[in-house]
Image (tube, rainbow, N blue to C red):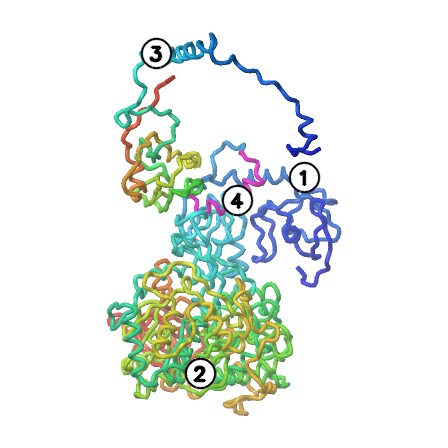
Amino acid sequence: MSPAGREVTITIDGREVPAVEGEMLHDAARKGDVEIPYFCYEPKLGDPVGACRMCLVEIEGIPKLQTSCSTPVREGMVVHTRTEQVKEAQNSVVEFLLVNHPLDCPVCDKGGECPLQDISYGWGPGKSRVIDEKRHFEKPIELSPLVAIDRERCILCYRCVRFSQEVSEDAQLQLIERGDRTYVGTFDDRPYVAPFQGNITDICPVGALTNYTYRFRARPWDIEHAGSVCTICPSQCNVSFTVRDEKVKRVISRDNHEVDDGWLCDRGRYGFEMFDAPERVREPQLKGGAVSWEQALEAVAEGLRRAGGKVAAIAGDASNEEGFLLQRILRDALGSPHIDSRPSRGPKADVLRRLAEPNVSAKVRDIDEADAILVLGTDPLHSSPILDLRVRKAIRRNGAKLVVATERPTALDGGAEAIARYAPGQAAHFVGELASAIGGSDNVATPVAETLRDAGKVVVIWGERIAREDGAAEALLDVAAATNMSTTDGAGLLEIPDTTNARGLREAGCLPDAGPGLSDTTAGKSTEEIREALISGELTTLVLFGADPLRDFPDTPAWEEALTAADFVLTFSMHDNATTAKSDVVLPLETHAEKDGTVTHPDGRLQRVRPSASRPENVVPNILVLSELATKLGLDTGIDSQPTAFQALTNAVTLYNGIEDEQIGGRGLRWQDREGATSARTGTEQPGPGGPPEGGSPDTQRDAPISMVQPDPTPRGVASADPPSGGPSTAANGDLLLGTYRDLWAGPVTELNPPLKFLTPQQRVEISRTDAERLDLKSGDKVRVNGIEAEAHVKERVPAGVVFMAEGVSDGNANALLNGGPVQVKIEKLDEATA
Amino acid sequence: MSFDPKSASYLDSIEVVEVQRGPKPGGVGGAYRAFGETLRGLKTTMARLIEGPMTIEYPEEKTPVYPRFRGRHKLHKFEDTGLEKCVGCSLCAAACPADCIRVVAAENIPGDRVSAGERYAAVYEINLSRCIFCGYCEIACPFDAITMGHDYEMADYDRRDLIFTKEMLLAEPVERTPLKSEGE
């Protein structure tokens, strides 16, 4: 489909329909309100295959019937969809499909929302002439622990196979056998385990692929669909909750091309049973015992008043309104500037303002059209899964060149044009080098820099965690300048933050050095400084809103100490966890199926989270709790509902000024896209191209390819593209550099959702072959890493000199080892006997 | 043409018909009307007198119902296997115009089957205070698992007691209502 196609007019059933030359006839017909039945056609899956033969139409000048899904439109085409010939073909196709399709609709989960039912009813012959036995397979078997497959019902439309091959690219699903014995399966009948497998149940046009979590739960007439936004990760995919008896029974995609392209990851799709987990905080708790809301709020107000301004707050999983109210309470009612929304350090406010400039920020859809994509310091599969599919799509469909520059091997490495690995703690250094290599004209630039330099539209997907290092964000702006992002349409930076609504909370004012709208304000303490101040006694009181420092923040032992040292800790939490156990007052949070509020996508899109399911009896809307608390502390916010909270937010945040709820609607609104959108920054100059940031490389290293950055001080971070360059590269004392990453499945979402429990990750120490040989380790050996016991996992692509461990896992959280700087770890092999 | 009844042209257009009247009171005609007609009516009364009283002493006595009378629902089991016929497909709930049926399905565990298929109704409730006894559920059922019975005596003291559960609907109903016999 060429986007610049010529406008043509075709005739369908005697009616003139406008179309774009080259688009598929089926699409043109749909736009012209002509319904053509189909099973296999799905533009999201890529090129049409014409497998189901349901969309046959008659085209004048072509003697045989053609599949409308794979016939491009031509000027003056005359198409008939309702002639005798077409009807006979449609009847025959339906009859053929029903030769082997069992009529167990009353039992089938798809019954009532089944395209095969609808099409048989609308276009089928009404009866079958077949009297023979139908094909039989063993009734539902596990395709995976989450998806059941009933092979009898499969009509072999190829959709799931195409999804696996061409969208998620895990290539696990195949059609096996031939003829009517064909079935969908995996090699050797292994379970299909992939992070996006749930999507195949959405696209299956019959009841062959169904969710175990929704098995026999409800019928389409029993349920209501409630559109909302998933806030489990920063992707903020648009979802539709299937609600029965006011409980969420299923999560399906709401298909917003600007955000998620109609796909969902399994975390969002199956992560709804935690709404009703036994661990859910269902009422206010004071020192572990349930109390009434009045008592709880009285205790909170008393605790905060007693702090006398020595109070700090950290927001985690919160909506914009909640973040806005929280910072008002802190700044205006308690007179404390110490508020943050980041798990660790981050760039200063003026850098954030420059990063928020509309002309250097990319929107999600820009990935589709980009010439080159740089994935920097993040693995989208783990931190924002839906962007992983987006990047794959850009490479596959648009020929985008992908460049990966990370510490740890990523899932996208296979499709990358160039790969660079830098050592943990060297991100700022690497990005600085990269900026000067792109900007400079020397011929020794690495493949990474060359690919980016030669490309027109560059989209940089970068992880918030690189900005924990001083100068990294500034260097990133240099990269933006070197690739002319500000003057190129469709180019820009796209951040993948560590927390769900990181951008919204920053813009709502949950930053130590910026108020609402990233405005100037009295500087307060950032997350790490808050922790130190709590330990030293400089601060006495802490408010945690949806943040779990004992799991998610680096240096958990120090946080443990800080929470113990604090006189009063107020925690808003959805579930009981280690942090709530150390809190004085715990107040319940709403889930994203219960909340009413707005969140901001990392690309600046404001989206509305709508209440879809009923909340437990004693859970109260959080904005009401916060405004009540503000009143008790003597601050009249005038907020008593979501609309008033949203009004207050848009009035205070200059970036959102004048945005109406109706404009957000169901699809969201990027604040940058509005007429006269205000810029966060006023009067700051664009950074000049190429200037290396402070801490840039010494001149001696200028000539070296940047992918061979030598980390300082000890071990050598490695190494260029695969195969990884081996070689001795370890510190003299044999210690290795620790790199950490957040695993897709680490966290409450797998631990509290029974269907996802089997995915709960165990701590693994990923180690290079070179180091493994030196330490005489093989995969599966038990090792102890600075006190954490874990299993060694020898990984080909891990650079020598570095080991990687997962953050946020319940057992052996790598966050316990981090202390803000590069960490050296000692690997001890445990004997089988002691292990 | 105007149809205003008061307009002259309308009155002119009406054909006036002379009413045929009976004889004036008094005389032979009057006497016949006073006694003859009364006796004629009494003849019918007297003729029915020997039949005895027609009153049915409900509830001691009950009118038999026709075989296709639509009374309280029944759920059925297979006679041979004892499994429930209902698979919990919820089609009855979809067909119900009064929205009085609630079905929550669940999956059969092999070895402890409830119904014949993969699926069974874990919850099957009919709110009889809302039911309009239209019989659509019976028509919708693909397995003849629900039929309309003959019982119409469902009055109770509490509305909650009118929500019939699966166990109540499966139980052999008390045959309180006589059925009309062939040709009756």
Residue assigned mark 4: A116
Which marked residue is nearer to the observer: mark 4 or mark 3? 3
The type of residue carrying mark 4 is: Leu
The answer to whether residue A118 is magenta is: yes
Q: Which residues are magenta?
A: A107-127
Q: Nearer the viewer, residue A703 or B159?
A: B159
Residue A384 pos. (x, y %): 47, 69
- Give the mark nearest the N terminus, 2 or 1: 1
**Chain for mark 3?**
B
Question: Circle 2 is placed at which residue position?
Answer: A425
Question: Extreme front residue here?
Answer: B26
Label 3 sits on what residue type?
Answer: Met
Q: CA distance from mark 3 to mark 1?
A: 75 Å
- The type of residue carrying mark 1 is Thr
Query: In the figure, residue B66 lies in which quadrant?
Result: top left
Residue B111 visible (yes or no): no
Of tags 2 and 3, the one toward the viewer is 3
